[in-house]
Image (tube, grey):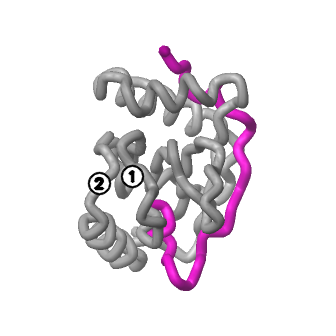
Amino acid sequence: MTMNGINDFKIPQYMDIAHPNRGFFGYLLRCRCLSAEEFYGDFIFLDDGIDCFRKFPTVRKRREEMRAEWNGRINRYQDIFQSQLYYIKEELAQNFYDFMTCGPDDEVRAFLKEFMVGVRAFALHNTLGLEPLYAVSHVSQLSDKDLLYWPHIHVLWGIRKK
């Protein structure tokens, strides 16, 4: 049930997350989730550029507090953001789900740390000077139509103000 970092994922896709009802950072926390959505397999592993490896809060009020806090940090950054979506390879989806929901926290943290090493290495030609600001794993995210999105990891990149 071991995962191997960025090699377990498809080539990243890019997404505009400037949704007016969610904000830049609130989108990553999915505060407008459905009541049936489960959070026990999700981790916040990069928070404001710091590798913190916290479990995603299961209490909706705490997610809403974090969303407000994150959106309040918008003035720390320039207005250039890029969101990457790393979808797990199809043949590893069940392993990823099992690992993130049942794996020991220390092993999950080690995997996420290794994942970020790969993410940073992938951005070798980063001419804008973007850096990863926030990252969240989404293991069991539901869509608005109660369909399960493919397990993935969001990484939000941006430029800090000096």
| Residue in front for this viewpoint, 133 or 109 | 109
Q: Does dot 2 land on a helix, a strand or a loop? A: loop
**120 relative to 78, above or below:** above
Residue shown at the point (36%, 70%) measured from the top left: 67
Q: Residue furthest top?
A: 1
Rendered-image quadrant of the C terminus = bottom left
Q: Residue 111: name its quadrant.
A: top left
**35 relative to 47, above or below:** below
Residue shown at the point (30%, 66%) measured from the top left: 60
Side of 112 where 128 appears, left or right:
right
- Which amino acid lies under the numbered mark 1 shown in the image of this protein? Gly
* Within-10-Å neighbours for mark 1: few <14, some 14–19, many 20+: some
Residue shown at the point (72%, 35%) measured from the top left: 10
Residue 3 located within the stretch drawn in magenta: yes
**63 relative to 94, above or below:** below
First along the sequence among labels 1 and 2: 1
Residue 161 visible in rendering: no
Residue 30 located within the stretch drawn in magenta: no
Specify the label residue 24 is tagged with.
none
x then y, percent, for residue 66: 30, 67
Q: Residue 76: name its quadrant.
A: bottom left
- Which amino acid lies under the numbered mark 2 shown in the image of this protein? Pro
Q: Which residue is mark 2?
A: 57
Specify the label residue 49 is tagged with.
1
Considering the whole magenta stretch, tell me its main secondary structure.
loop
x then y, percent, for residue 75: 40, 79
Which residues lie in the magenta part?
A: 1-29
Side of 90 where 19 appears, left or right:
left
Question: In the image, which is nearer the foreground, mark 1 or mark 2?
Answer: 2
C-alpha separation, residue under disc 1 versus residue under disc 2: 19 Å
